[in-house]
Image (tube, rainbow, N blue to C red):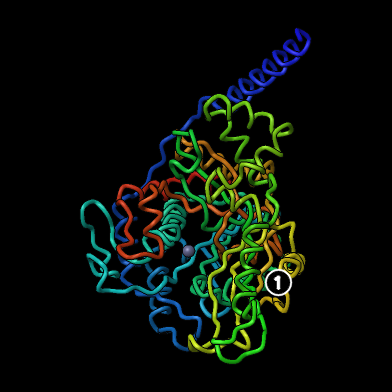
Amino acid sequence: MFYILGVLAAMLAVLLYRAAAFKAKYTGPRRSEPVKVNRERAQENLATLIRFATVSDADYDKTDKALFAAYRAKLKELYPNVTARAEYRELGNTAMLFKIKGRSDAAPTVLMSHYDVVPVVEERWEHPPFCGEVHDGCLWGRGTLDTKITMVGIMESLEDLLAGGFVPENDLYLSFGGDEEVAGISAPAVVDWMEENGISPALVLDEGGAVVDGVFPGVDKPIAVIGIGEKGMCEVEFTATSTGGHSSTPPVHTSLGKLAQTIVNIENHPFKAQVTAPVEGLLKKVGPYTPFPLRAVLANLWLFRGVLCALSQKLGGEINAMMRTTTAATMAQGAKQANVLPNVSTAKINMRLLNNVTADQALQYLQSQCAEDVTCRYTICREASPYASTDSDAWCKVEKAVGDTWTDAIVSPYLMIAGSDSRHFSRICRDVYKFSAMALTKEERGLIHNDNERIPVEKIGTTVEFFRRLIEML
Ligand SMILES: [Zn+2]
């Protein structure tokens, strides 16, 4: 009895010690030198760019090509130093690629953004969606958050640095697409061009995470989450067959019933949860700031992996989505009329893949969950990206620029659930990071792709500060 108590006490002491050691490691003082930013010019230039209604369309022929060209010309006009110093080319339908020559071409960096935006429903906006006006301390307009802001952040900081005679240590590329929202060909065209020219970036940074509040249970500090990978995405179509006829003489299961059974099977038997690299990274960084029992668990992941996996669905939608391949049944279709038995019924699920499951493996698993006479196939398929490193030079530079800009934030890796153009760069670069350089409240994050998108004006300058700190290290 005493022996068992002794062992338990020793285990608890080890847990407490390890939790304290983690805390000491991650809470050291952080230095932040102020950087000079022309906040008025940044705000004015962002407003100017917002006034171009650069809405992309999956059908490129329906895109207002003259307007996109005018936007590109305006961007170059607003930043004369960058334009004068850069080698510039246009690739794909809409990509702008600037190259600023550095002292070396050994470890180039690509900073990315996109200037196309999603459509608006004008009558639902409080102020016109392309007005670029300031109301109540916010600059209004589609694209202010997603993501003309980061384009302005990159261009503003580089414009000033170049004016001061700055030469980057390594070649610096700026890659801006105009068809990201419609998964267009421009970013892949830039990657093709780089591959043909033997350019292997050491670091790629695109939109993705942000500095966020209240996403992790029990942590009251803001967390700056930097995406180190993207999930894949598949649309899977299920088809069920059965004999048709009049609904007054039904079989035990109609084809729609078999589909329903299939969907319930899949929901009841989800893909297994696992502590993926981004989740492990996040838990290690955030762990020291969580309340006691959880802190001890997170400091001892080696011991509690199984418990965490079992709890994944309780840790919230975002954490759960980072820990497993997810499926969401979203569409179903049976007969065209209520008194007709459907010969064929179809349903669709939207699946988001972790990167250790291929689309084919996932499909095989789904097929194993199908009821009788139900088959499945994917209609759209995009595999997940590999994970970037969290101990390379590239990571350290991004981590430092983030930490020096948002000094009270925990800086952490995470897994991006949505998609971005930067996934194409995984073909030529290991360290592809996804971070939209802004501190965003939950409400502000909800404005992305939504009505009344706007950015508080004081945040514009902070985005510029971040890029200035980063570019100076490249
Ligand atoms: Zn975007």
Say which element carries label 1. Answer: loop
Q: Nearer the viewer, residue 184 or 260?
A: 260
Seen from the viewer's position, the closer of residues 429 and 324 is 324
Residue corresponding to mark 1: 371
Q: Identify the residue at image location x=73%, y=75%.
A: 372
Q: Which residue is rendered at x = 44% and y = 41% of the image?
A: 214
- Residue 474 visible in the shown view: no
Vertical side of 341 occupied by 284: above or below: above
Amino acid type of the residue tagged 1 in the rendering: Ala
Q: Position of residue 353 (x, y in %)?
A: 66, 61
Q: Is residue 65 visible?
A: yes
Q: Residue at x 63, y 86 (%)?
A: 344
Q: Using residue 135 as the reference point, say whether residue 374 is left or right of it.
A: right
Report the side of 66 relative to 254 (left or right).
Answer: left
Residue 421, given in percent of the width and then of the height, sits at 57, 66
Q: Is residue 438 left or right of residue 107?
A: left
